[in-house]
Image (spheres, rainbow, N blue to C red):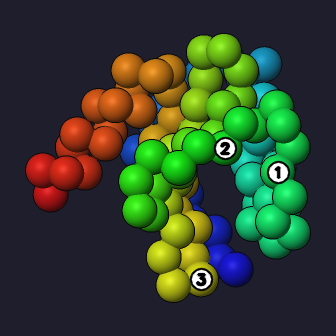
Amino acid sequence: MKYVILRSFIRKFDSYQKKEQELVVAALEKIKEYMETNRAPYGLRIKKLSRKIYEGRINIHLRIAYFRERGMVKFFCLGDHDDIKHCLKILKLK
């Protein structure tokens, strides 16, 4: 499986402090492991938001949104609950 991190995700990632960045990197690795083994750690609480879009919870404040298509996983949004809602709204407009 191929993994892509979009620029919008990277910009948001760069705005966080090192401690949060480490949590995000660890969560990305766990999501990749989940994609390969189909076994998710409970702490990620992966939730299906739509047909292709999923959300993984890093902690009570941080979430990662990604979508799957044709053997590819694209990480497109990082932030709190409201940030994820905003990203989803923008996606629907495109």
Query: Residue 64 shows which numbered tag?
Result: none
**CA neighbours of label 1 inside 10 A, class few (<14), some (14 to 19), many (20+):** some
User: Which badge, 1 or 3, comes first in the chain's sequence?
Assistant: 1
- Residue to which mark 3 is pinned: 71
Identified by mark 1, the residue type is Ala
| Of the two numbered discs 1 and 3 in the rendering, the one whose residue sits closer to the viewer | 1
Q: Which of the 4 image quadrants contains residue 63?
A: top right
| Mark 3 vs mark 2, CA separation in Å | 18 Å
Q: Nearer the viewer, residue 14 or 77?
A: 77
User: Which badge, 3 or 2, comes first in the chain's sequence?
Assistant: 2
Secondary structure found at label 2: loop
Residue 9: image location, x then y, percent: 49, 44
Residue 15: image location, x then y, percent: 53, 24
Residue 35: image location, x then y, percent: 75, 66
Identified by mark 2, the residue type is Ile
Could one spot residue 76 in this view of the protein?
no
| Mark 1 vs mark 3, CA separation in Å | 18 Å
| Mark 2 vs mark 1, CA separation in Å | 7 Å
**CA neighbours of label 3 inside 10 A, class few (<14), some (14 to 19), many (20+):** few
| Of the two numbered discs 3 and 2 in the rendering, the one whose residue sits closer to the viewer | 2
Query: Residue 40 shows which numbered tag?
Result: 1
Q: Are marks 1 and 3 in contact (CB under 8 Å)?
A: no
Q: Do the residues labelled 2 and 1 touch (CB within 8 Å)?
A: yes
On screen, residue 29 above or below 89: below
Identified by mark 3, the residue type is Gly
User: In the image, is 1 to the left or to the right of 66?
Assistant: right
User: In the image, is 43 to the left or to the right of 16?
Assistant: right
Q: Which of 93 and 20 is in front in this view?
A: 93
On screen, residue 77 above or below 92: above
- Residue to which mark 2 is pinned: 46
